[in-house]
Image: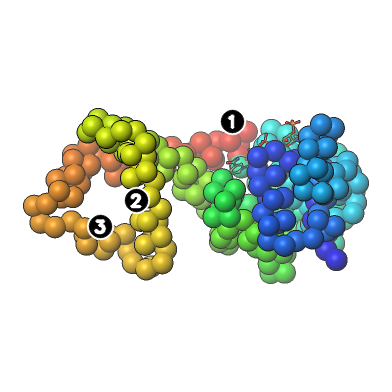
Amino acid sequence: MSITAILGAGVMGETLLSGLVRAGRPVAELLVGEKRPERARELEEKYAVSVVSNLEATRRADTIALVVKPQDMGALLDEIAPAVRPGQLVVSLAAGITTSFLESRLPDGVPVVRVMPNTPALVDEGMAAIAPGAHCDDDHLEIAEELLGSTGRVLRVPEKQMDAVTAISGTGPAYVFFVVESMIEAGVHLGLPRGTATDLVVQTLVGSAKMLRETGTHPTVLREQVTSPGGTTAAALRELEVHKVRAAFLAAMEAARNRSAELAEGV
Ligand SMILES: NC(=O)c1ccc[n+]([C@@H]2O[C@H](COP(=O)([O-])OP(=O)(O)OC[C@H]3O[C@@H](n4cnc5c(N)ncnc54)[C@H](OP(=O)(O)O)[C@@H]3O)[C@@H](O)[C@H]2O)c1
């Protein structure tokens, strides 16, 4: 039996916990570290999981998932470091916290994996990128893949790509929601009831996303397939080009990448 401890059961911690439970992981193999008694009771009632102190969870676990806010990570590491052993695996989901920061606060030789998850994990359609620390081997990455695989897809990347990953998939759901909002508003401007516009946009998004994933066809080809010469789509796409939407996306994601790098530096 391999025990996984989740330290920090906020939005992302609970998402991971519920994903593991839905994926069939026995709750006897899960532990949660949570300091607020009322939150502990809520999680115990909802998932029948054991909620214990961070130290007890750390002592008993084989894999320790750190899911606190980046600014709380230093204090959490100070608390658990005396109980962490090299035979364990530490997996951090905190944005901008580097493997070298984690390794410097943990006993020598403890393997560490850094993860950038995203919120569609809530509906088992997450996209998590994982990067190994200095003491990590393939078995450790496989354990992290299995852990994150309970809430969606997992991709291995070198750590130097993590700021770009943060800008694309970590922050990505917000851009998609922004586009969806804009299309719904446009539908209202064109005279559609808001509910109708919402139904049309959401299903169009889901359908397009499914086409991308299931056909594996390049988005340019899919777009060309619905762009007849001189037609309605061509007229719309011309306006998107005139308004520099492509350039705006590039600038937005560069800004997110740069901000991620700044946060990692503690700015
Ligand atoms: N949500 C996202 O979309 C997303 C996406 C990618 C990455 N992440 C990463 O996921 C991590 C968690 O984010 P979140 O959105 O889940 O934040 P959150 O909802 O604030 O959850 C953090 C939880 O950690 C608890 N906590 C703080 N210090 C603790 C300690 N020493 N021991 C045990 N628990 C402690 C907090 O409890 P209190 O409330 O009592 O302080 C809170 O329940 C962050 O590092 C973030 O970068 C989140």
Residue 183 in the image: x percent, y percent? 31, 38
Quadrant for residue 181, please give it: top left
Pointer 3: residues within 10 angstroms few (<14), some, or many (20+)?
A: few
Disc 2 target residue:
204
What is the quadrant of the N terminus in the image? bottom right
Q: Residue at x 88, y 43 (%)?
A: 52
What is the quadrant of the C terminus in the image? top right
Closer-to-camera residue (237/28): 28
Residue 75 in the image: x percent, y percent? 79, 35
The amino acid sitting under disc 1 is: Val
Give left or right: position of 188 versus 79: left
Closer-to-camera residue (74/7): 7
Mark 2 vs mark 1, foreground winner is 2
Q: Residue at x 54, y 55 (%)?
A: 125
Pointer 1: residues within 10 angstroms few (<14), some, or many (20+)?
A: few
Pointer 2: residues within 10 angstroms few (<14), some, or many (20+)?
A: few
Disc 1 target residue:
267
Residue 118 in the image: x percent, y percent? 56, 47
SS at mark 1 in the image: loop
The amino acid sitting under disc 2 is: Thr
